[in-house]
Amino acid sequence: MRESVGSFMKREPNLLRPSLLAVAMFALCGTALAADGNYLVTPTDDDGRALPGFYPNVELDFGYDDNVRRTEKNTDSSTFAKLKPEVQWVGVFGKHLVRFGYQGDYGKFFDESRENYDDHFVGADATLDLTPKFTVNGGVAYRHEHEDRGSAAGGKGREPNVWEQWSGRIEGLYGRRIATMQIGASYEHHDREY
């Protein structure tokens, strides 16, 4: 009987608990974006390793804009609602990382329907540690967005500018991460259409 109690106490650690903690931390952080604005921040443990899991987040905002078109003479106003769903799946396989993500931004202006928008970002990337000194990173992404009126690139016509972009990148790094120097080569391609 002691052996069964001892073997029960030596069970594997509960992996659900760290995942729930990571989801809670991510939800509290809100919509934090990486420096390039393309991905949700990947939650990490105390050692800096990515935590695998599914990370959802949703924001809902309501408000009132007294100058929707951002002009001096035409001050059309409207109440609005904005919905921002985000989801990310992170898979860690040994030293390899795979990530898929979606971000949406939907805006509904109740009195100015021409200002409604639906922006999307869908992306996937991977980091492959092929040897202790050689790593390959790559990713693809699709983005469909609008430019707010009043911004430097925003439209002053009948409707805001809308654009979509496909992008891809690949990078190879040689050298240990803890080394003073790494040698790398990368290529990025962006195709944007208005």
Image (tube, grey):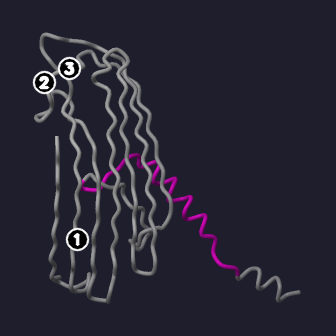
Q: Spatial distance from mark 2 to mark 3, Cα to Cα?
A: 8 Å
Q: Which mark is first along the chain, 2 or 1?
A: 2
Q: Is residue 51 above or below residue 116?
A: below
**Badge 2 is on which residue?**
156
Q: Spatial distance from mark 1 to mark 3, Cα to Cα?
A: 40 Å
Q: Of the residues shown, which amino acid type is indicated by label 2? A: Lys
Residue at the image point whose x is 39% and y is 61% from the top: 42
Give the label, 1 or 3, closer to the camera: 1
Residue at the image point whose x is 32% and y is 20% from the top: 113
Residue at the image point whose x is 21% and y is 78% from the top: 172
Q: Is residue 39 left or right of residue 53?
A: left
The spot of residue 148 in percent (x, y) is 21, 31
Q: Is residue 83 left or right of residue 12?
A: left
Any mark on residue 8, and which?
A: none
The spot of residue 129 in percent (x, y) is 33, 82
Check disc 3 and report its element: helix, strand or loop.
loop
Check disc 2 and report its element: helix, strand or loop.
loop
Any mark on residue 170, and which?
A: 1
Q: Of the residues shown, which amino acid type is indicated by label 3? A: Arg
Q: Which residues are magenta?
A: 11-36
**Badge 3 is on which residue?**
69
